[in-house]
Image (tube, rainbow, N blue to C red):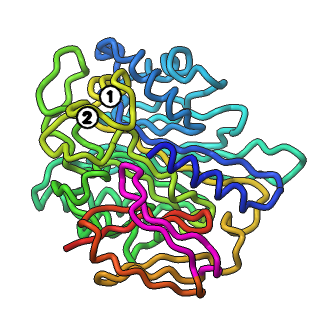
Amino acid sequence: MKHVRRTLLLLLFAAIPAVAADTVRVCTYNVLRFTADNEDGRVPMYRAILNEIRPDVLMCVEVADATMGPRFVTDVLTWAPFAATPYINGPDMNAQLFYDQQKFDLVGQRRIPTVLRDIAEFTLTTRPTNGIAKDTLVLYALHLKASDSPSDAAQRAQEVQAMMTSMTTARYAVIGGDLNVYAPNEQAYQQIVGPSAVRRFVDPLGTVWQRNSTAFAGMYTQCTRNTNIAGCGGGVTGGMDDRFDYLFVSEALEPRTIMASYTAYGNDGQNRLNAPINVPTNTIVSAEIADALLCASDHLPVYVDVVLGDVQASVRERSVPPTVTLKGRTLTVSNATPGDTIAIYDLVGQEVYRTAATTTSLQIDVRGLPKGLYLVQHAGVGRRVAILR
């Protein structure tokens, strides 16, 4: 899949006008109860993992003491001059943000109290060159109530509601973290992406998914292990069968979001519902990185790329961007330009369909494709769609 993503990004950047802009990688990671007493030899693993991802902004949850900030700045995020936000010790575990000081300034942070943990709000401004105006990016780091009882789901909804009622009005905002939601119809999830949301955000993978299903295996972020592992920070077991970790972008940021870049790092789409991230052999990361993902945390990191700076309103360089919709067994590509190449890839990067648009609206019969998650790419724009049976 790496080579497919690289191709998609190159195609996309070729379509962006030549103006001052920066592509920023935002990452969220549940770092599994990180404290000085629970490092458990995991710092070199975080360094190896994050050096592969190289985010510009890193949101961490399950930070349990003030040692993580200086430790990560000195020994993990070593490829750029990172800074950590001040540690605020709230109830239970906490969130912390790391940012590349060459690209961002921290202008504020605050905590939104909930019945369990604080939700952290971080406000960054870009450090642009060539005298262009600054962009503001507001990020929310969540770690919602765990477990799947009705009372747990109700508490998650209360926690999201507390955030949404005090939500920023800044155009560019990202919500990320460990939501512990079990289905897309859960109230906490709908309060973020649903039509009645106080402020609606966009899930780059779409809102059609379910847990514990091979059809959606490529979307899962938890759990990286299926048995208890000594010396790996504790955590839970069970295999890769839940989508708990997310990045959502505000509607104004969505046109500047490179949807094809959205990645649950280390998830190669294989059936691991009751298996760890390194068995069978992982097909998209090295054995060393797969082992590090297994031990560093019981969650995978998730990242996405967004374009900030003085760019046109859409990174797609079209007044009406192309869209992809799936209804029944028919995939419709609208607002295409005749001659555009349209291709469909599975989650391991294999091309399963290719054609060229002959009109501005093209319909593709996908009955021949097995159920699962696919990447539809055209004109440098990627969209993931879920095909069900």
Left or right, 302 with reference to 314: left
Left or right: 33, with 361 as reference point: left
What residue lies at 56% left-to-right and 68% top-to-bottom?
A: 378
Q: Name the residue under label 1.
A: 290
Is there a contact, CB below 8 Å, between mark 1 and mark 2? yes
Mark 1: which secondary structure?
Answer: helix
The spot of residue 361 in percent (x, y) is 54, 87
Residue 352 in magenta?
Answer: yes
Tell me if residue 294 is in the magenta stretch.
no
- Quadrant (top left/top right/bottom left/bottom right) for the C terminus: bottom left
Q: Where 245 falls versus 266 (above or below)? A: below
Q: Which residues are drawn in magenta?
A: 336-357
The Cα atoms of the two marked residues, 1 and 2, are separated by 6 Å
Q: Which of marks 1 and 2 is nearer the N terminus?
A: 2
Callout 1: few (<14), some (14-19), or many (20+) C-alpha neighbours within 10 Å? Answer: many
In this orientation, does residue 134 appear? Answer: yes
Q: Residue 47 appears at what percent x and percent y?
A: 47, 21
Residue 294 position by quadrant: top left
Amino acid type, mark 1: Ala
Q: In this view, does 145 lie above or below 42?
A: below
Identify the residue shown where x is 21% and y is 43%.
240
Residue topped by disc 2: 277
Give the tally of numbered discs.
Answer: 2
Residue 286 is situated, as x and y percent measured from the top left of the image, at: 38, 27
Q: Nearer the viewer, residue 38 or 349?
A: 349
Amino acid, disc 2: Ile
| Residue beneath the point at 76% across and 42% down | 127
